[in-house]
Image (cartoon, helix red, strand yellow):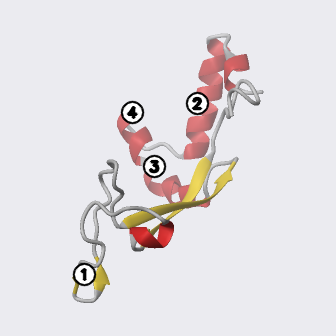
Amino acid sequence: LRRELPPGIIGSWCLQTVITWGRPSEYGLKAGFKPDFEVEGLGFGLYDSFGRNPPMHIPVTQDVAFRHGGGTNVHMGIGGQYSNVRYNRRISLGERIGFEIKRAVKMKALDLLVT
């Protein structure tokens, strides 16, 4: 996107993604291990590693939301885990956006943050 529409996507956005149980062959993919392996009738797979052969948890991106995702509403009370660690306190997505804008103004770099 950066090549087509410089400077690319700036700001909050998310990939709306579903992790589904599926056989890689259903998606035209090759399994890293036997795709018919099942545990008590449930499909079984790994999610944490993508090598040349995908695991059996199949991430399917439905769309790109050019805003923060609705799931961030939960963060209003507990904060986002990444932000909590980065800023060492609970911070909602809205507060973080405000913080980043304020910081960009102080650094005279607002043009790098918004279009």
Q: How far apart are marks 1 and 4 (CA)?
A: 40 Å
Q: Mark 3 points at which residue?
A: 79
Marks 2, 1: nearer the viewer: 1
Label 2–label 1 contact, CB within 8 A: no
Marks 1, 4: nearer the viewer: 1
User: Is label 3 in a helix, a strand or a loop?
Assistant: loop
Counting residues from the start of the chain, the first of labels 3 and 1 encountered is 1
Q: Mark 2 points at which residue?
A: 99
Towards the viewer: 30 or 72: 30
The three-letter amino acid code for the residue at tag 3 is Gly
Q: Name the residue under label 1.
A: 38
| Picture coordinates of residue 44, whole percent (x, y) | 27, 74
**In percent of the image, x 49 and y 67: which residue is there?**
27
The three-letter amino acid code for the residue at tag 4 is Arg
Q: How far apart are marks 3 and 1 (CA)?
A: 37 Å
**Badge 3: few (under 14), some or many (20 or more) residues near its Cα, within 10 Å?**
many
Picture quarter with the N terminus: top right
